[in-house]
Image (cartoon, grey):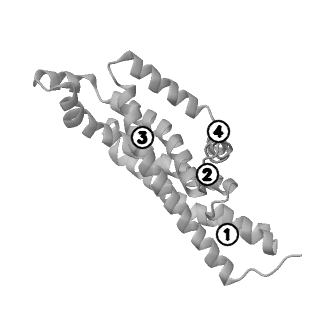
């Protein structure tokens, strides 16, 4: 039998939104650092490093995020390593983000015209100086819209953390629904919260794409 949806339930969902944002931010920061390293390995002149990073990207992109989360949370638990839900979710999302953002950024670096690196060589810049002072500043301009767009996917992906007991927005909705059983109302409100988080990012991504797309100018 269903119960009444109260203000306390709404506050509990709002707390879930805060944890969703915290998990998204943590995963984006950690995944961004790891993704930058993946990008550097993908454009390395050493063939072994390129192939190792390529294999990593293909494995992670070809594996569902839920499986990665299960391996970290339940798999490590089997061998005696207890991982808190927040840590497990953060690490799983970091691994997931690193593969996708690393590949996004690799493509953006390679999208910078070859003439730019050739010009840097004419100025006697080393490969790293060329990358830092010439290539990356231009690649950032190209990478900003797809990176913001990926953040939308990341926010929605945090809902999978609910399966390991981390109380973000989806898990908070599940807990409330288990007590009052009003799925249409509760998950409808949760969906509205997700929309409120993701829609501005989608609009921002499209706006950045129009503003930063040099090819249209």
In this view, which residue lies farthest toward the front? 80
| Mark before the other along the chain sequence, 4 or 1 | 4
Residue 126 is drawn in which quadrant? top left
| Residue at 61% from the left image edge and 51% from the top image edge | 82
User: Would you say residue 101 is visible in this rendering?
Assistant: yes
Residue under numbered circle 1: 189
Residue 62 position in % (x across, y down): 61, 31
In the rendering, which numbered label is found on residue 90? none
Residue wearing tag 2:
82
Give SS at disc 3: helix
Q: Earlier in the sequence, mark 1 or mark 2?
A: 2
Pick whichever, 204 or 100, lies toward us. 100
Q: Are marks 3 and 1 in contact (CB under 8 Å)?
A: no
Cα–Cα span, label 1 and label 2: 33 Å
186, above or below 195, in the image: below
Badge 1 element: helix
Q: How far is disc 4 from disc 2 in space, using C-alphas?
A: 22 Å
Pick out the residue farthest to the top.
47
Kindly report which numbered mark, 4 or 2, lies closer to the viewer in this rendering: 2
Q: Residue at x 61, y 63 (%)?
A: 168
Would you name the residue on which mark 4 appears?
64
Q: CA distance from mark 3 to mark 1?
A: 34 Å
Tell me the distance, in whole angstroms, between the alpha carbons under discs 4 and 1: 27 Å
Crowdedness near tag 1: few (<14), some (14–19) or many (≥20) residues, C-alpha within 10 Å: some
Q: Residues within 10 Å of mark 2 (few under 14, many from 20)?
A: some
Q: Earlier in the sequence, mark 4 or mark 2?
A: 4
**N-term-proximal mark, 3 vs 1:** 3
For mark 3, what is the residue? Answer: 34
């Amino acid at each position: 039998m269903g119960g009444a949806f109260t203000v306390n339930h709404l506050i509990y969902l709002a707390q879930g939104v805060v944890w969703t944002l915290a998990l998204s931010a943590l995963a984006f920061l950690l995944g961004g650092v790891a993704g930058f390293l993946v990008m550097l390995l993908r454009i390395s002149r050493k063939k072994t490093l390129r192939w190792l990073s390529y294999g990593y990207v293909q494995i992670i992109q070809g594996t569902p995020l839920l499986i990665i989360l299960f391996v970290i949370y339940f798999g490590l638990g089997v061998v005696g390593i207890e991982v808190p839900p927040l840590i497990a979710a953060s690490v799983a999302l970091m691994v997931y983000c690193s593969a996708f953002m690393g590949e996004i950024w690799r493509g953006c670096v390679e999208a910078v015209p070859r003439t730019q690196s050739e010009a840097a060589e004419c100025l006697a810049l080393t490969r790293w100086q060329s990358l830092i002072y010439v290539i990356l500043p231009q690649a950032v301009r190209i990478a900003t819209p797809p990176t913001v767009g990926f953040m939308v996917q990341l926010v929605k992906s945090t809902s999978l953390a609910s399966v390991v007991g981390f109380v973000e927005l989806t898990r908070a909705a599940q807990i409330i629904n288990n007590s009052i059983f009003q799925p249409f109302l509760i998950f409808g409100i949760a969906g509205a919260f997700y929309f409120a988080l993701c829609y501005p990012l989608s609009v921002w991504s499209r706006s950045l794409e129009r503003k930063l797309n040099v090819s249209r100018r």
